[in-house]
Image (cartoon, rainbow, N blue to C red):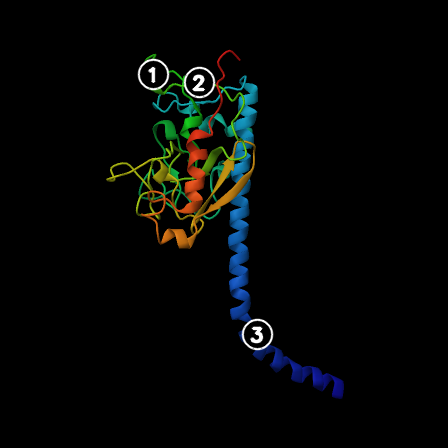
Amino acid sequence: MNRSAFRFLELPVVVSILPLLLPILTPSLAQTRKFTKVTVCQRNLRQLQVAYTAYAAGWRTRLLPYICDGARPDAFWMQTLQSYYAQSGQIRRCPGVPGKNPESYWGTASWGWGGSGGWMNGHYGSFGIRGWLYDIMSERPDGKYNYPSQDRYDWECTGRTFSPGVAAVWFDCNWVDAWPYHADGPYPDLSLGSQPGQPGQTSMGRLCITRHDWSINLAVADGGASGTAWYSQCWRAWFTVAHGWPFSVRDLRPALRFATLSSCRGS
């Protein structure tokens, strides 16, 4: 009897301690959920790069075509790669993004892109591909190339990639693709990202968004994926450090633009 009474008296003590423990445990649980979303996001990005590699292997190392005229919606990357990632549209989306933007085809830091008509063809997602890694020799139905002659370079096939460990291919983005240039600046509203019609909009601004606090996730050409943090001490000097770039992004931007594919001419 005495032993049972002792256990009964312990119960109020335990109950009284629980409210004290909850404020301690709740942030840890929230942080765990956030970390899980980041991990799944990076896994999805890796899957996209694996799909791209498999596609290139089946097409004699050719890059993805750049065809978005609406006449051939199956030629854009969402449809072209779909069979290489098990027909799962979730691979194109960060788990921290609930779905496509209900107000626009364009995404934001919190919403994904998506649409039902034309080349979008009902697809949705929250990642973008680096446009510099399209097959720039892709022809349109009118027989013209998708890039001016002075911008054609030699990017028709994968060949040998310069610095594959830093050459970003896929990343968190508010649109399906971006052509980040080393001299581009971010859009001031990082929760929105750069979109058409905005004054001073740039392609780099499409991926400069606060999707994972002050960072984005990206996958590089060798199949690795990681986060790229924007440090707060550099954030305060946003418009004075490296022409408006925080330190971490300043280090990344040459890789985004110039760690491109070597010439495939003659291969």
Measured along the vertical axis of the image, is residue 71 above or below residue 97?
Answer: above
Residue 105 relative to residue 57: left or right: left
Contact check, label 2 and label 1, Cβ < 8 Å: no
Image point 48% across, 39% down: which residue?
218
Image point 54% across, 34% down: which residue?
165
Residue nearer the viewer, 25 or 219: 219
Q: Which mark is residue 149?
A: 1
Measure how far apart labels 1 and 3 are at the Cα level: 69 Å
Q: Residues within 10 Å of mark 2 (few under 14, many from 20)?
A: some
| Residue located beneath label 3 in the image | 18
| Residue located beneath label 2 in the image | 154
- The image shows residue 86 at horizontal and vertical percentages of 56, 32
**Amino acid type of the residue that numbered disc 3 sits on in the rendered structure:** Leu
- How many circles with numbers are drawn on the protein? 3
Measure how far apart labels 2 and 1 are at the Cα level: 11 Å
- The image shows residue 173 at horizontal and vertical percentages of 41, 39
Measured along the vertical axis of the image, is residue 212 above or below residue 158?
Answer: below
Residue 252 relative to residue 147: left or right: right
Q: Residues within 10 Å of mark 3 (few under 14, many from 20)?
A: few
Q: Which mark is residue 70?
A: none
Residue nearer the viewer, 250 or 91: 250
Res 264 visible = yes
